[in-house]
Amino acid sequence: MLGSPSSDSGALAVQLRSLNLEHVSPAAPPAAEISRRPATAAATEAAAVARLRRWFFARKPDAGFVLTDFPATLLQALVLDEWLDTRGETLTGVFATAGADPSIVGHYHTLGLILEDRDLAA
């Protein structure tokens, strides 16, 4: 799910909860870390990607999952694509919320993975 779940994606969130899929989001609070200075935005993003990478490669092969708030940048989308290629997996579909980054939506649209509301009703 590109972008954060919002009121426009409420029906989708209800449908997703009914499925036996793992729900993962980098928006979950990270483990407490001791630091003497605040982290930069780049360091925060790198830590989030590292946590998701550990999750991705530790999960069972071909286990279904729903990612929310990731990928949040085109670079993250390309990294996720690389992870999927490494494991010989593909995405079934990508749903873009109203706040999704247009470059990421364009990337997945080019790959034919963007789901429309009518696709979800089926």
Image (spheres, rainbow, N blue to C red):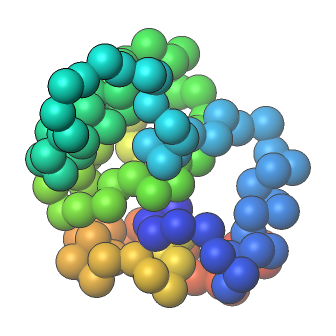
For the point 35% across and 27% down, the residue is 51
The reply to whether residue 40 is visible in this rendering is: yes
In the image, residue 105 sits, relative to residue 4, either above or below, namely below
Position of residue 54 in the picture relative to residue 85 (left or right): right
For the point 75% across and 55% down, the residue is 16
In the image, residue 46 sits, relative to residue 118, either above or below, namely above
The residue lying toward the viewer, choosing from 97 and 34, is 34
How far across and down, in percent of the image, does residue 91 sit?
44, 49
The residue lying toward the viewer, choosing from 8 and 34, is 34
For the point 44% across and 81% down, the residue is 99
Question: Total marks drawn?
Answer: 0
For the point 59% across and 27% down, the residue is 63
The reply to whether residue 119 is visible in this rendering is: no
The residue lying toward the viewer, choosing from 60 and 6, is 6
How far across and down, in percent of the image, does residue 14 sit?
83, 62
How far across and down, in percent of the image, does residue 30 sit?
44, 31
